[in-house]
Structures are given as C-alpha cells and as structure tokens.
Image: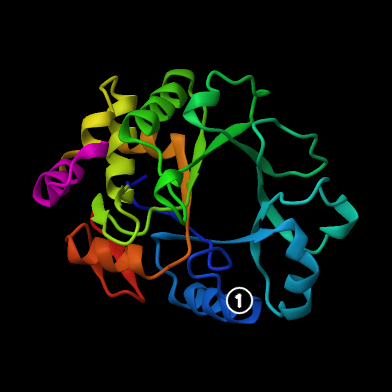
Amino acid sequence: MTLFHSLVDDAGLFPPTALPMAEALRRHRADLAGGSPVLTHRFLCPASRLPELRAHLDFPIRLGLILDTPDVPPPADLTDLAVELVEVPGGRAVALDLPARQFVEVTAAQLPVDVPPGVGLKVRCGGLTAAAFPSAQDLGSFIAYCAGRDIPFKATAGLHNAVRHFHPALGTDRHGFLNLVLAVCAAVEGRDPVPVLRSTDVGELVRLAQAVPDGTAGRARRLLVSYGSCSTSTPIEDLLALGLIIGTTADAEENV
C-alpha cells in the first residue's frame, strides 16, 4: 500500500465548489474513466439529496453517505446503491442496518470519545471561515489519539492543496493533505505529528514522503482511510508537480 493510493473521496457537491448534482455526476463519471489511483472513486452525497441523486444517476456508483437527516435512510431506500461509508455528525454513533463502515465526526475538544468496535472517527480540517480550521496542535492531538487506539479516521474540508499555506482571504493557514498524510506516518511511528502539520517547507515534506518506509505507509493509510475534496483534479496536479506521482492528471501512476 502506498501513501497516496485511494486517498481522495469525491466531495464535489460540497462547498466551496458545490457543483450541481448533474455536473458533479458528470465529473465523477469522467474521473472513473480516467482511473487515477489517487482517487477512491467514491462519491460523497448527503442523505437529504438521495432523491436528487437517483433522478440524475445512470451509471453504477460507490457511495459515501453523509448523514444530514434525523434518521438513517432505511435499507430498502438504498438497495440499488453501493453505500460503503456513512459519515455521522454530532459525536455519536448510530445504529446502522447497512454493510457500511461508520465514521463519527468529532473535534479534538470532544476527545476522548466512546465509539463501538469497528466505528471510526471523522475530523474537519477547515471550512468557509478561519474559525473552522483547527490548529495544528488540535489536529495533531486528534491524529495521535486515533493512532494510539488504532481507530481509523476520515478527514474533510479545507485540504485543498498538498502543502500548508496561508490563505489571505480567510486570514488563516490551510492544512495541506501531504502534511496530514505525513503527520499520520509520524504518529504511527510514535512521533509527535504536530511539527509536520506546521511545516511549509515543500522540499523537506517531499523528502519525508519519499523516505517513508513501506510498513509505515501501510499502517498510516489503514489509519487514514481517505479525505473528501471538492476538487478531484487539484490533489493529483499537486502530487504531480511535487514529483510524488508520475503520469498525467488523467492517468497517474504512483511513485511513492
């Protein structure tokens, strides 16, 4: 297992891109045809928009369901959809009558949390305001908590580019998805993940990525299941530009 294999879920329906359903599905279908190994080829959809999804869907799809409704849709409403993941807000697991993995969204301030065996966690790494971005210390605490207890997790929001950078319009630093992956590598090796989360040294981050042992990469990616990105092209373009994968944006082959 490599660091960037099946890393990015398709969150095209969500801000800031927020594509209309038909356009999001067209892009998803094109990504399926492109077959980049960086993408999970899993489409994230709010439960409240399932009727709209059905109205536009004309090809098989693997689904990550974002539970934004009071109740989980009954299995009968999901029989023709391959639901692989259910992401749940509010810090509490729900009863699932589905063969799907569940991820409960929490913040570092909510830790420790009691989750049933087999249930993972979800962390929000940003949003539409500066206040939505957790500090490197808080995000590092979350990662270390999951690594110490072998709790798989997903990440969402804010991870628009590979490397941490300042965003003038928001007035805050955005976390980088490369920083995140390398922070998980640090945590599974028993090291503090915070320094690599804070790093903006592109060359050093690339060097670290190229030096990750296979065993560490495998453990890190079992822990970090994936992250949702409203852009499915930017992560591939960034990794290509950094020399961490080789190929084209349509047909990238992993180098790490």
Which residues are the magenta region? 197-210
Q: Main secondary structure of the magenta part?
A: helix
Give x and y (percent) for residue 154.
51, 42
Q: Quadrant of the N terminus?
A: top left
Residue drawn at (17%, 60%) of the image: 242
State left or right for residue 171 relative to residue 59: left
Q: Is residue 120 visible?
A: yes
Q: Secondary structure at mark 1?
A: helix
**Residue 86, relative to residue 28: is it above or below?**
above
Answer whether residue 218 is magenta in the image. Answer: no
x, y (%) of residue 129? 44, 53
As drawn, 117 above or below 122: above
Q: Give percent across and percent down for residue 76.
A: 90, 56
Q: Amino acid at mark 1?
A: Leu
The residue shown at (33%, 42%) is 180
Label 1 crowd (10 A; few <14 / some 14-19 / many >=20)? many
